[in-house]
Image (cartoon, helix red, strand yellow):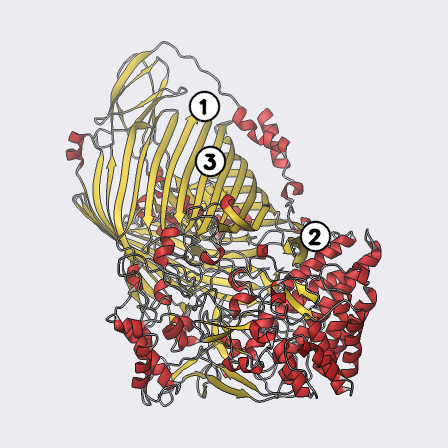
Amino acid sequence: MMLLAGAGLILGSCTADSLEPTLTQNKTVEGSITKVDNLYSVLKGAHNIMTGAGYYGRDMIATSEVRSDNCFSNGNSGRFTTQGEYEQNANTGFIWEEAYETIANANIIISTDVTTLEGDQAYGEHLQGAAMILRALAHYDLLRVYGQQNAATSGNLGVPVVTEFKGENLDPSRNTIDEVKAAIYNDLQTAFNMMDSAYDGDKTIVSKYVAKALEARVAVYFGDWSRAVSASEAVINSGLYSIVSADSYVSSWTADGGSNVLFELAFTSADNRGSNALSYIYRFPEDAPAGYGDIEVVSTVIDLFEDGDVRADILGYQDGGTRLRNMGKYPDTAVGADNIPLFRYEEVILNYAEALLETGGDALTQINLITANRGASAYTTVTKDDIINERRKELMFEGFRFDDMMRTGMDMPYWGTAQNSLGTLSYPNNLFPWPIPIGEINANSNIVQNADY
Amino acid sequence: MRAKLAWMLTPFLVLCMSFSFGQEKTVSGNVTDQNGLPLPGVSVMVVGTSNGTQTDFDGNYSISASNGQVLRFSYIGQKTVERTIGASNTINVQMEEDAQALEEVVVTGYTSQRRSDITGSVVKVDSEKLGEIIAPSVDQALQGNVSGLTVSATSGTPGSTANIRIRGISSITAGNEPLYVIDGVPVSNTNVGTSGAYSSLSALAGLDQNNIESITVLKDASATAQYGARGSNGVILITTKDGKAGKTVFSINSTYGFQNDAITGPVPLSAANRLELTAEAYFNDGIFPSKAEAQDYLLGASFADWDANGRPEARWDQVVRNKDAVIQQHSFSASGGDEGHTFFASLGYMQQEATVIGSDFERISGSLNFSKDLTDNITFSTNNQASHMLQNAFLENSAYFESPRTVKFFLSPLVQPYNEDGSINEFGGSLPNPLYLTKNNTAENRLTRIVTNNGLTWDLTDNLTFGSTFNVDFQLYNFRSYSNPTYGYGAPTSGDASQYDRTNVFYVFQNYFDYNWELNPDHRFKFKVLQEYQSNRRYFVGGAGQNFADEGLEFLDNLGTPTSVSSSYNDWYVGAYMGLVNYSAFDSRYVLDLSFRREGNSRFSKDNRWGNFWSVGAAWNLNKEDFLADSDIVNALKLRASYGVTGNANIGLNNYQSLFGYSADYAGEGAQYVDTFGNEDLTWETSNTLDIGVDFGLFNNTVSGSFAYFNRDSKDLLLDVPLSRTTGFTSQVQNIGELNNKGFELDLNFNVVDTEDFGLSVGGNLSFVENEITKLPLDPNGEERTITTVRTRIETGQPAYAWYMPTWAGVNPDTGVEEWYINGVDGETTTNFNEAEAVFQGGNAIPKTTAGLNLNLRFKGFFLNANGYYAGGHKIYEGWHRYLNESNAYPILAFQGYTSLLDRWQQPGDIARNGAFTTSATPWQRHSKYLYDADFMRLRSVTVGYNVPSKALEKIGLTKLSFFLRGNNLATWVKDDNLLFDPEVDISSQNGTVDPGETGLETPPARSISLGVNINF
């Protein structure tokens, strides 16, 4: 009978509690943000998403370069040929998912009520401002990749602006280009007002003046020249940054946190990017073809540089001197442990110069600040073409050229794996906007696909 | 929890009583069968004691006992006889056949049932059949032997996992693997490998198939509802061998054989082919005005060395081949027992080499099954299986440049494997020499698995039994990789290494009561109530790093730069209560089975954790009706039907909460990010299954078989519902969607001749299953949220993962350009791939029709067994064709194509399978050209052998001696000539690391020929 009683007890003892799983390495989203420091942790998490190979860790920059007239893909590992040969379709992945992941985490920070948190609330607001910069940057990246501004089939669709995590509408439509632009400007203005430079630390976290640098970049892209002037001036007048000198231009790429850097994404050797590193797609790990090294420089690009221009030293040759390469930017090929600058002071100056030119200001002084520090001849007069050309030389391999060509309406030459010409795409063109990924189209019928995909 | 554990162990602490004996004498006698022939091996036991013996070869026995005690004579297939000891010292017994006892008893889950009492679709495969396939993991042997069951190996790499599907697929996102039960206890038999890139390792490979008595496959709800939430995909019950009372039997089973790839596979282009095709591509692209000029250029450039050296062809496929790879297994077992205890003990060893260099599998295993009557109503049993496996794995689940399996498709035949002095050529380039890497790099999977299953049964009364079971399945897994610092991918970082350890501990507790109640002899009831609790805890830790000071150091401690540390702890729990009723009327003329199970699972939130599962089954044995009782034609005829609800909870852990993950780091500091979208409403996926069947035996079982129809509706599917990516997530698990599987199964066996000297039987099975998605979630605009990839689409009205892609229209004979149908079906064609509409191509990767055929022939001591398998009605897709089987730059410039590419367009008018060669790198374009009918037939096994007659064996003291020659996968027929790869491909996505139903670069199945011997003494 004892045993029967015992067995009865066993049978009755299996309650819901004994089925409760343990969470050891996760925390629930609801209720786990209690301190300002938790916001900082999520902010770092958002930065980390941007370092992924699918975003600024490689594809954002590499794709922009291979689609421009700077580079082509030699297909050594089968990568970036589709992008370089303009054969992309809705299955060719790009930054859509990564950018919206960044936005999701930024939104968690922004929507937190800092007054409920332990810690310095002003610092909490500063972190929220930083999150708004990341949200604006991600929306801008999405807009320049997927927006219809460069399409032949006229359209004004941008990308969905998302400002809530797990909000009411999980199936948004595409906002218009102007709406996205307005949201970006709004975020940047709010961020700038919320942030306090006193809280800015390492350059690997977005800081107050990045808001203005990004505003200038976006304004230049859309030709909002007076906004570009004032935003650039805000950065310049902060006095926090300077142009790197000719002597240290090449070596500045081997060091982190230079005086010319406003914001760079952190990459350490522990991150071990391995074969997915940006550097690994720019060059072979040894002289002969090996590894990836698919993105090769168009051989005539070297002719852009006059003698003595230190920026030519960024380029070099591999495979017995037959392949022109980016050797100097992101130089750590094996591990990919170089930080990747997203905002350099030189770009701010170039934005400023161009905006001044467009608004009748003194562009010459500004552009000669660049040439003077690069071992290049000073300009005596300056044209729009000069500025675009100077931008190409200064910002080469950093993912700017494609957008510069787009916003100035240039036609696009492109090449096959042996640098054999595949022709020139005339501007505007339906191949310039990237297709919205098929996964988005299938999940969300509110999304309209770009023409011809 | 601790208190509960103590209570659960209570039954084991019950001590047995002791017994005293009266005055003893020796009783002896002779036991014969109903024909008066001596019966050896009859158990003779003094009732109420543990005193017992067995009759010898001539049926004689002697035993010590006292007057008034009762002797019980028992033997399989004979009615048990009891005799009270009187004055005489001699008791002779003639036994009678027991028709009922002769009927096979089948394990049907938590209980065992006589065949005629079974109301569901249950198939039993015995050890002899299982033994016909020599493989580390016993699941491979089920192919072709169980109707409605398909096996697809993930790889031919020794020890890797296989996917089993029973009656189609019941879930889109949640798992489709059946539940494995070893000796009554649910266990996990999944892949234990930690890296999706390296070869998988099956936990099931830890079981030596020589220790397995039988495997029973449960297919319908009446059988599987007992397993509640894990029953939807079918249940595979593994019963290990027990000892039988009597003289200890020693058994030696040994096979030794050689293997090669079952089919040749694609043949790589030669250097001469490559020269021709490259020159042609240069000409086609207008880079040279003629092919001859292009060829001259190449002979002066990339082909110059090759030309100067006398045009040597590097045959990488042959260089890396491990011709006649060894496969061997040896097992030694002892079994026996006396009245009161039985045992089975074994030792086993298995070794298998892969058919390419660099990979092999080795296992040592031991088992001990022991059962002891502690008192005359309490029995303790323990079944223990322990094994240690070592698998030298390699990177195979994608196109890894370093893998010896893939090298023939990537390395140019211009590159020589060896230097002139015979040393390994350490050439540069993207693709390192695998000869060096297999020798100097390491990737190994190790698994130590111990399954211990301990039970106590206590016969409280004649009709009431209490039982308790405690099971531990302990799996200790280690993975280690090392890349040397000198050559290959490890070189730029001065070597790298990683190590991962995972410990899985499963506990299962079961407590139950069995009660048999006889209202009267015509109405018998069997009841069972059971409580079960299962827990799984998984501990994982690992690290990786780079930079060794010297060669030959392979472990983490010597690394200069640690690059990652990872760890995890996971747990899940299942609790259940269950009741079973079996009612049998008029000696099983009518049978009714009822089951109910209430089960809770930690994968769901508290409010949705518990689910109810049930089944009803009924059988009518018509042969027991008066009108058939005396039939000369029909000796067995049963109609059966069952209906029930089962569940599936096979999804990831902790999916119901919105979660932050902390596995990120940024700038050397910890960081967090939202990594689970969450869904509080998550709950069970359920399946309602109807099963109707007829089992029959005609002409005294000369013809026997069964036919079954099934219809399974699965609803509330646990589905990774695609989300708009603007949420930051790609999908969310929801209970949405419905699908249906229906089909039939036919099993037939025909005993053509069955005499003492000659026997011939032919058997077969045929099954057909149709899968259709019937409901999917809608988006706010009322449009179905299909899940579309570049090859498949999930949409209502179609089977799950139906092939979906543009339709290839062939190569335009005038231009040499490949074209597709604009509307996806017919009519106007286009050369712009993006303009071609994707359409359903018919079917998916799961066979609709499967069939098995077996033949057994014996003449005197000789025997021949053969087993074949057919699968059809499905399609598979060729992976990697962009790089290896398209007339673009990759197969001729970067990698290495197949000779199938020689069939290409060269000039206007050519009808060719491939378009004109080009030096362009065409993008990924997946279309119907690379989708093949996958129908195939395979001769799974052929065994010829000889049993040495028992008369001859007596002299040398053996009871059994047989020799045999066994061939596996000797012949394969494939319907589609363009399908160059083995037709048996992985149908599971393996958590997204491979594409389901796509041919990959994994090891194909092997063809083997082995010589074996079985000895009993």
Q: Is residue B28 above or below residue B651?
A: above
Choose mark 1 or mark 2, whichever is in front.
2
State the separation of the CA atoms marked 3 and 1. Answer: 19 Å
Q: Which quadrant of the rendered structure holds the C terminus of chain B?
A: top left
**Residue B262 in view here:** no
Amino acid, disc 1: Leu
Where is residue B747? Give x, y as percent: 35, 55
- How many marks can you see? 3
**Residue B861 in view here:** yes
Amino acid, disc 3: Thr
State the separation of the CA atoms marked 1 and 2. Answer: 51 Å
Q: Considering depth in this image, is B845 or A200 the residue closer to the camera?
A: A200
Instruction: State which chain disc 3 sits on.
Output: B
For label 3, the crowd category at 10 Å Cα-Cα, with few meaning under 14, some 14 to 19 and many 20 or more, is many
Quarter where residue A370 is shown: bottom right
Residue A412 is marked as none
The answer to whether mark 2 and mark 3 are in CB contact below 8 A is no
The reply to whether label 1 and label 2 mark residues of one chain is no
Instruction: State which chain disc 1 sits on.
Output: B
Choose mark 3 or mark 1, whichever is in front.
3
Please report the residue visible at 52 percent of the width from the left and 38 percent of the height from the top.
B527
Q: Considering depth in this image, is A59 or B962 the residue closer to the camera?
A: A59
- Residue farthest along the top direction in this orientation: B23
Identify residue for label 2.
Answer: A28
Identify residue for label 1.
Answer: B374
Where is residue B62? Give x, y as percent: 27, 18
Identify residue for label 3.
Answer: B452
Q: Is residue B26 above or below residue B417?
A: above
> What element does badge 3 sit on?
strand
Quarter where residue B386 is shown: top left
Where is residue A303? Give x, y as percent: 54, 82
Name the N-terminal-most of marks 3 and 1.
1
